[in-house]
Amino acid sequence: MFVVLYRKWFYAVSALLVIASVAAMAVWGLRYGIDFTGGSLIELEYANARPTVEVVQKQIGTTDIGAFSARESGDKGFIIRTKHLTQEQHDVVIAALAKDADGKVVGVEEKRFDSVGPLLGQEAARKAWVSIALVLLAIVAFITYAFRQVSEPVSSWKYGIIAIIALAHDVIIPAGAFAYLGQYYGYEVDTLFITALLVILGFSIHDTIVVFDRVRENLKHRSSGEQFEHIVGKSIGQTFVRSINTSMTVLISLIILYFVGSEATKHFVVALLVGITAGTYSSIFLGSPLLVTFEKMQEKKGR
Amino acid sequence: MRRMTKHRSIAVILLALSILGGYFIYSSEVKKGNYTFKLGLDLSGGTHLVYKADTSGLAAGDVQASMSSLRDVIERRVNLFGVSEPVVQVEESGVVGGGGHKLIVELPGITDVNKAIALIGKTPVLEFKLVNESALADIQTQVQALDANGKPIGGIQQSPVSSKGEPFADTGLTGRLLERAELEFDQRTGEPQVSVQFNREGSELFAKITKENVGKRIAIFLDGTIISSPVVREEIAGGKAQISGGNMTSKEAQSIVRDLNYGALPVPITLEGTQKIGASLGASALQASVQSGIWAFVFISLFLILWYRLPGLLASVSLAVYVVVMLLLFKAIPVVLTSAGLAGFILSVGMAVDANILIFERMKEEFKRGRDIHSGIFEGFSRAWFSIRDGNLSSLITAAILFWLSSTPLVKGFALILGIGVLVSMFTAITVSRTFLLAIAPKSHGKVSTFLFNNGFKN
């Protein structure tokens, strides 16, 4: 019940987080990965101690591949990002990097080379936007359909609208987190990040549906004179433990994936961690209380 | 009591099948037979190449056929490379991707990108051109008018151009219209020659060209150099032509035949994307994924048992059944496992539990209302069903959209595994858990059974 009672406080928390996230995106912007912008990425590992960043920068500077960035990775490695390289340019860069400051050849292994042409990048970016839009649309349509029998006192399409508000909240917060992490830790918005967002959408809607479903059921067995507000409060209470426990099991998986899992999916896991936490919050403290707010607004208009 | 016996026997059969399945998974990995897991490039190491096909020169109706013959040609070349289980596939971008066709080549275990690109990109071009004798003669005199150092005399342009037209005119007859090439030996001289057979379109064109140009010469170019330029004596129907000339050795003829057969790309392609993953990186990613999978399972089971007690233990057992079924499906379909796919699987282990949690919470409520254990179990399952169905449907929608729209194999694998996981988890979390629960559910409320079926930290 306290969730419905103090809903304005919970809205405030969400609003604050969303504003902070939007601000982070406005100030720092998102750092897009090469799969959207096009470009090349080389990850290498030196056999012995790695040269300093300055040496690496100087070595790449001897080639004429244009702007690039070099970042240390792991204990002996570097990750180098450049514009889209041809295979020949790539070979030149590798040859340059296999030399130390004095021009002596050192052992270096290329662990990864990703290269994405500008056309492919544009295509991936377009697909990312379309898939997010499609998932949102499909979910609203689905909720409107699934709750079609519930029209009193809040009509079913409003459940859909509320779901969208909750989902926007769940997507904006990890995006804001990535603006911050991108600025200070080099986190990139890439295809995997978009995938994470879509999973968050799916998961959060799953959570929200469970609460809505309970509201639907309780409305069916409503005793006369029972307030809508009270029904929503009761429904949240009944599903509270389940929501927390389900999120707990998923968070357990994610935390383990973060610490033990593959390096390639680490940033993906961080996005999921932030988003699923936000999603759990929104389905308990944002989505269902909003039903009450919508009903109150309706009542006011009716009078 | 008879119902219980039924549930017990089903439960025992389910358990036995799962153990058998688990043993099969284990032994097939140890034996390295036909049923090992298919690992994606990011786990096994290898090269992933994306080519953009330029279909602008083709008529709209020909695009599909040309793309599939492009795939066949590349497949043959890749097979020459001796890679085990290469993947060559054509992908249409569709409206969302902005149209266009892509060719995707995956070479597991190959990290020498240069060699791979050279092999795939090699395009022997076979062309038949009509010789314009006067223009040719004109140019030949120009070329002869070079001084001893090869510099043109008397202000002739660097590359000779004749005012009488192109010395070699395109006929439209190219390697694209070839059906096959064979090595033959001239019956009189015993010299090696290449015999080519055109397809229907090519045969018609060849007949038309020879009919209209009797007495003229046709020059045959391979990779831009003239191989021979025989004189047309009569119309050649049937679409068979011999290429012989110069001092072609039988070895040279053989390599021409091979290039022509495995050769001529029907559609020009350009390399748009490269992805190379070293074997060591792949192996460590695999190890990390497997380890996190095991730990996730252990911790989730612990959590379930601590919170839900006996039902929690049963949920862990059905979670184990879930894992076995999923792994068997990965082998049977087969699903190509990538690091993102494995992350999706591990995530789905967390999500698979959700249905059980919903059901157990519902059961607890029913017990509170004073139902006995048996009917509480039934009510819990039937009431939780609607939330499980709706929630899982929305996850399936997400998985389907992801699978349909994603352009990277990483994301496709993730979506596929998420989708299968949702479906399988509905079976294991509902049917399997219920069978186990009913198999051991006591008839009466004793102190012990109440404790075992309760949950949460307060009693």
Image: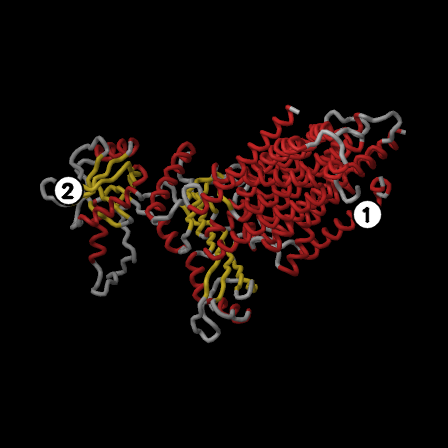
Residue A116: give x, y in percent of width and height: 50, 51
Classify mark 1: helix, strand or loop: helix
Residue A67: give x, y in percent of width and height: 54, 62
Given residues B117 and A43, the one toward you in this image is A43
The subunit carrying tag 2 is B
Left or right of A156 in this view: B420: left
Given residues A300 and B242, the one toward you in this image is A300
Left or right of B375 in this view: B205: left
Left or right of A94 in this view: B386: right
Question: Which image quarter is the N terminus of chain A in?
Answer: top right
Residue that label 2 marks? B185
Quadrant in which residue B454 is drawn:
top right
Given residues B211 and A55, the one toward you in this image is A55
For the point 19% across and 32% down, the residue is: B235
Tag 1: amino acid:
Ala
Residue that label 1 marks? A12
Left or right of B361 in this view: B301: left
